[in-house]
Amino acid sequence: MHTTLGEKIARFLINIFISLTASLEVHGIENMQGLQSYILASNHIGRLDALLIYRFSNRRDIIMLVAEKYRESRMARWFVRQLDGIFVDRFNADFTVLRQVLNRLKKGGVLVLAPEGTRSPNAQLQEAWPGASFLAVKANVPVLPVGLAGSEDDLFFHNLKRLRRTKVVVRAGKPFHLPPTDGLTREAALKKNTDEIMCQIAALLPPPYRGVYADHPRLKELLDAS
């Protein structure tokens, strides 16, 4: 896979920006090694989140979905183009994007997304959409859960104004395939699989970040088993 000059520049700028503004503490990086195609599912609490994967992953086949609203920014359009990202409408089904994502997953790409669909307004997990579970089953790829703590916008921009770096903790869990959903309706199967993904993410987060999944029975099972 040929690396373009634009991609090299974009990754260099991202690395410089993160080095200057954040202090990263990364756990479980070994869980990413040896994987081919997979879905990296994480919570989403700040604008910095999307850049972090380019910092701690050497993968060049990252599939990054970017909200359509950022197409209005010339800088965002440039970065998305150089990094081969995909603009997506979060609120309407786009089957062209779906086919593109599935095709790239089948070729060995890594899809990075937040099942919640948007940034959490309070850094706590919100109810997730079923897109991640649908794609994982459709593409028959494992899910790698990632929990982010410390990158919320209020804290990040507060420190940035004071020229202080923000400590961000990244925890990658073990990859897993979604459990069987035999006998369930499509809606129930999607709900069960989505809850599994979100509870796996919640298990990697400090208690204040677990939000609506804090009291989920599946999360308790995961915490008891850890």
Image (spheres, rainbow, N blue to C red):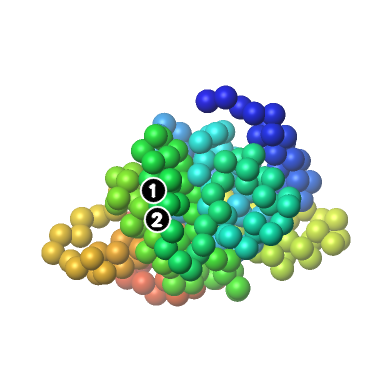
Question: Mark 1 and mark 2 in contact (Cβ < 8 Å)?
Answer: yes
Identify which residue, 146 or 83, lies in the foreground. Answer: 83
- What residue would you read off at disc 2? 95
> Looking at the rendering, which quadrant does residue 164 occupy?
bottom right
What's the residue at 55%, 34% (across, down)? 60
Q: Amino acid at mark 2?
A: Phe
Q: Residues within 10 Å of mark 2 (few under 14, many from 20)?
A: few
SS for tag 1?
helix
Q: How many marks?
A: 2
SS for tag 2?
helix
- What residue would you read off at disc 1? 99
What's the residue at 43%, 59% (across, down)? 94
Q: Is residue 24 above or below residue 225?
A: above
Q: Residue furthest front?
A: 96
Q: Residue furthest right?
A: 162
What's the residue at 31%, 61% (across, down)? 193
Q: Is residue 215 visible?
A: yes
Q: For this view, does 134 lie left or right of residue 52?
A: left
Q: Is residue 174 above or below residue 130?
A: above
Q: Amino acid at mark 1?
A: Arg
Q: Which mark is residue 225?
A: none
Q: Residue furthest left?
A: 183
